Image (cartoon, helix red, strand yellow):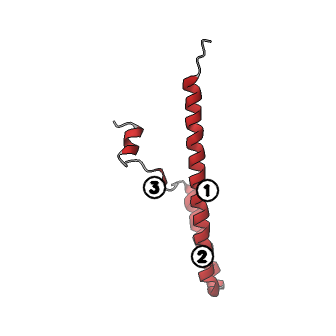
Amino acid sequence: MKSIIEQFYYGELNPCEMPVPTTKKYKETLALLAQTEDEFVKRFPETKNSLTELKDLMHTISALESLNDFSRGFRFGAKFMLDVLGKDESK
């Protein structure tokens, strides 16, 4: 079995391509979002383009937030491990 470092090096591990959640709550919320969007466009068809632009901006913001969270989490984990491995409890 390859180490996580080897998997990352050989391109077998790509955190930004991890699958979306598969929980029941996630699926229900996603379905509710689609239903709400459909109802909104039916009521106000002239807003479809604006709604699409809004969704695109929200996706961009979400991706930037995910990158930030991943970076912060990765740094925290690395600092945590450095602290754990660098301490000598016998002193």
Q: Which residue occupies 60% across, 60% down?
A: 62
Residue 65: mark in rendering = 1
Against 51, residue 13 (above or below) is: above
On the image, the x and y values in percent for residue 59 come to 58, 65
What percent of the width, then of the height, locates residue 21? 52, 54
Residues at marks 1 and 3, CA–CA distance in whole angstroms = 15 Å
Q: Is residue 85 above or below residue 13?
A: above
Instruction: Give the image quarter of residue 38.
Output: bottom right
Where disc 3 sits, the SS reads helix
First in sequence: mark 1 or mark 2?
2
Left or right: residue 51 compared with residue 10: right
State which quadrant residue 27 falls in: bottom right
Name the N-terminal-most of marks 1 and 3.
3
- Name the residue tied to disc 3: 17
| Disc 2 to disc 3, C-alpha distance | 23 Å
Say whether disc 2 or disc 3 marks the residue closer to the N-terminus: 3
Q: Is residue 88 left or right of residue 18?
A: right
Type of amino acid under label 1? Glu
Q: Position of residue 80 (x, y in %)?
A: 59, 32
Front-most of residues 41 and 56: 56
Q: Quadrant of the N terminus?
A: top left
Q: To which residue does mark 2 refer?
A: 53
